[in-house]
Amino acid sequence: MLESTIIIDGREHLLGRLASVVAKELLAGQKVVIVRCEDVCVSGSMRRNQVKYAQFRKKRMNTNPGKGPFHLKSPARMVWRTIRGMVHQKSARGAEALGRLSTFEGIPHPYDKKKRVVVPAALRIMRLKSIRAHTVLGDLANAVGWKHQELVKTLEGKRRVGAEAFYQQKKASSDLRAKAEAAAAGDLAKVNEVLAASGY
């Protein structure tokens, strides 16, 4: 059954494995948002991935390079382009599927206040041996010309401070509620029996 929108936290996921799972969901009609794309990982060392990207940069239209292929430099667009290659984007079905995808660096509003999920089958810790080298997509993008790595880090730092304050406030209020329920447990015993008999 389709949910309204699935918000995936891309941190510590392997790019290709995450992309294949997301592509299937998109083709099935699911809306997907991927946040923190700058923390997605690619297997292989930084140097290896820089060489592969340099080879990709050489691929262009000989007579008019302005017509493509376009070499996207931001992590969110790199993830988007990877998924684009896994849905048949030139067909109507594939184009509609791609329209259901959104990718972001960091966690912008309103997704910072919503539940985020991970894809266990695509997590680096589950799929890649600890001795193997890996590259963080944000570092690769920064090396090839993406100019907003420091800005995203600053904004994410501010978001984390706010999120921590909200969590502490929520924890304090839940502790107070638990104390109040414990204090009123004797008075509410008869009421709870009646409710239980009614199926609540």
Image (cartoon, rainbow, N blue to C red):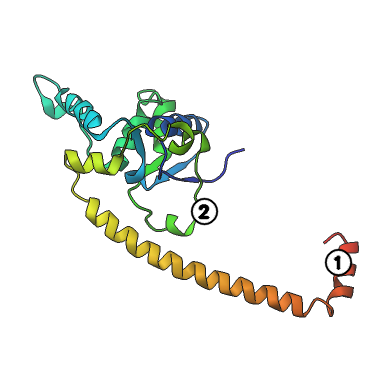
Q: Is residue 17 left or right of residue 56?
A: right
Q: Is residue 52 left or right of residue 28?
A: left
Determine the residue located farthest toward the front in the rendered image.
131
Gap between marks 2 and 1 measured at Cα:
31 Å
Query: Where's residue 7, x and y in %?
Result: 47, 47
Q: Which mark is residue 195?
A: 1
Secondary structure of the residue carrying tag 2 is: loop
Secondary structure of the residue carrying tag 1 is: helix
Name the residue: 14% across, 24% down: 58
Name the residue: 84% across, 78% down: 186
The residue to which callout 2 is attached is: 115
Say what amino acid the circle numbered 1 marks. Leu
Quarter of the picture holding the C terminus = bottom right
Relative to 156, say whether 192 is above or below. below
Name the residue: 41% across, 35% down: 130
Q: Which mark is residue 146?
A: none
Q: Pointer 2: residues within 10 angstroms few (<14), some, or many (20+)?
A: few
Query: Is residue 96 at least partly visible in the picture?
Result: no
Task: Give the quarter of the image for residue 76.
Answer: top left
Relative to 133, say whether 105 is above or below. below
Query: Is residue 7 at least partly visible in the picture?
Result: yes
- Of residues 68 and 152, which is closer to you in this image? 152
Query: Where's residue 185, x and y in %?
Result: 80, 76
Query: Where's residue 80, x and y in %?
Result: 34, 36
Q: Is residue 117 left or right of residue 197?
A: left
Which callout, 2 or 1, points at the residue further toward the start of the chain? 2
Task: Give the quarter of the image for residue 83.
Answer: top left
- Of residues 132 and 173, which is closer to you in this image? 132
Say what amino acid the circle numbered 2 marks. Lys
Quarter of the picture holding the N terminus = top right
Relative to 149, say whether 130 is above or below. above
Query: Where's residue 90, x and y in %?
Result: 35, 23
